[in-house]
Image (cartoon, grey):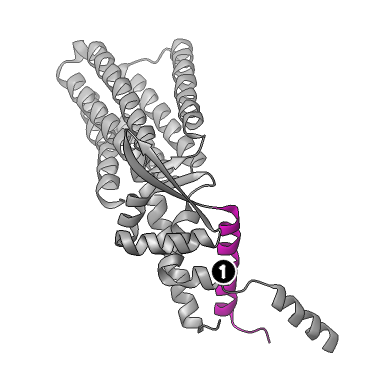
């Protein structure tokens, strides 16, 4: 079978285009719902903290519980109605990611106990950047490099705010540029990567 | 040098060749989609149809052709009592696809001088 160089080039371009579309569809399938959920929680909790600082502990606790329940529901529904199904591996992958987050929160607790941050801003920034570390690891595991870039970008924004934003407005900063970025990326993937 | 050319030509005949089954444009798109998934990942028929923007009949016909060649597996199952069809590339299909891509790259690179 003979084809011209131009036809071969066009075929190869088609292959690359479809591969990118497929990987993006996978990202949309698995990640968008969770990014929208946790981006929203982050933004709402941060705004709540800004306006009702004395209730910050309760706000974050309640919304984190909502987030965990929401995560379980989303993951279960994805496993059951998955457009892309991993034969015999789905539950292992879910447990692996759960293990990562569980280990991270345990270590965060240990580090916070040992280091005892001076103020709420430092604690806020520590938790945010630790979560972004998990995003980067997950992105590397599954070759979802948009997660790596998201983790790095939000880490940069959170740290920049720590040094540039006046004390009383840091929660608003993380609401918009931390949670807002995560939420925005989730919405973008949901809309444009299907 | 003659011997070298002969051996080189013999070597080229053994190298990747275009696969007639895969080279059809729709089937090339299908295989590209399936090979983009990890080994062990299956994609839903309806989802694949949406990504490739094909009709049910068109996609179904080409999937059957690929299955007959042993390049893909089609699995019909039920999810929440609704029939679902999942598709994945076989090892043979992945090898054939890789060989096809290698052949395309060889054509793009042009003949060796």
Q: Residue furthest left?
A: A51
Residue A97, relative to residue B69: is it above or below? above
**Residue at 42% of width from left, 51% of height from top?**
A23
Q: How many marks?
A: 1
Is residue A78 visible in the rendered structure shown here? yes
The crowding category of the residue bearing disc 1, from other C-alpha atoms within 10 Å (few below 14, some 14 to 19, many at least 20), is many
Residue holding disc 1: B100
**Residue B53 lies within the magenta run:** no
Task: From the viewer's perspective, tell me whether residue A174 is left or right of residue A148.
Answer: left
Is residue A156 visible in the rendered structure shown here? no
Q: Position of residue A90 (x, y in %)?
A: 47, 33
**Residue at 20% of width from left, 29% of height from top?**
A172
Local SS, label 1? helix
Q: Position of residue B74 (x, y in %)?
A: 46, 50
Q: Mark 1 lies on which chain?
A: B
Task: From the viewer's perspective, tell me whether residue B24 is left or right of residue A162.
Answer: right
Task: From the viewer's perspective, tell me whether residue A55 is left or right of residue A65.
Answer: left
Q: What stretch is highlighted in magenta?
A: B90-113
Q: Is the stretch drawn in magenta largely helix, strand or loop?
A: helix
**Quadrant (top left, top right, bottom left, bottom right) of the N terminus of chain A:** bottom right
Residue A118, relative to residue B32: is it above or below? above
A59 or B60, which is in the foreground?
B60
Quarter of image, res A118: top left
Q: Position of residue B30 (x, y in %)?
A: 43, 61
**Residue B112 lies within the magenta run:** yes
Q: Residue furthest bottom?
A: B2
Residue B49, relative to residue B1: is it above or below? above
Q: Position of residue A88 (x, y in %)?
A: 52, 34
């Amino acid at each position: 079978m003979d084809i011209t160089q131009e036809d071969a080039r066009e075929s190869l371009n088609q292959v690359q285009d479809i591969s990118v579309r497929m990987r993006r569809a996978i990202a949309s399938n698995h990640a968008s719902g969770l990014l929208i959920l946790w981006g929203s929680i982050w933004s709402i909790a941060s705004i709540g903290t800004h306006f009702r600082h004395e209730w910050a502990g309760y706000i974050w606790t309640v919304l984190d519980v909502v987030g965990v329940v929401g995560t379980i529901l989303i993951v279960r529904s994805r496993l059951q109605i998955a457009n892309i199904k991993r034969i015999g591996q789905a539950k292992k992958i879910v447990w692996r990611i759960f293990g990562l987050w569980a280990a991270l929160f345990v270590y965060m607790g240990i580090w916070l106990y040992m280091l005892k941050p001076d103020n709420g801003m430092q604690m806020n920034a520590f938790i945010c950047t630790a979560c972004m570390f998990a995003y980067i690891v997950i992105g590397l595991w599954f070759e979802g490099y948009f997660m790596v870039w998201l983790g790095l970008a939000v880490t940069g924004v959170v740290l920049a705010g720590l040094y540039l934003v006046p004390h009383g407005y840091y929660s608003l900063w993380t609401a918009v540029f931390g949670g807002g970025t995560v939420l925005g990326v989730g919405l973008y993937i949901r809309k444009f990567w299907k | 040098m003659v011997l070298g050319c002969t051996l080189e030509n013999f070597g080229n005949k053994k190298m990747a060749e275009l696969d007639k089954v895969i080279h059809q444009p729709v089937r090339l798109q299908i295989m590209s989609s399936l090979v983009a998934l990890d080994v062990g990942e299956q994609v839903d028929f309806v989802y694949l149809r949406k990504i490739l923007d094909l009709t049910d009949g068109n996609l179904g016909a080409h999937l059957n052709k690929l299955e007959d060649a042993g390049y893909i597996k089609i699995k019909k199952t039920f999810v929440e009592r609704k029939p679902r069809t999942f598709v994945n590339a076989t090892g043979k299909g992945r090898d054939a696809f890789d060989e096809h891509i290698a052949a395309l790259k060889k054509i793009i690179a042009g003949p060796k001088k």
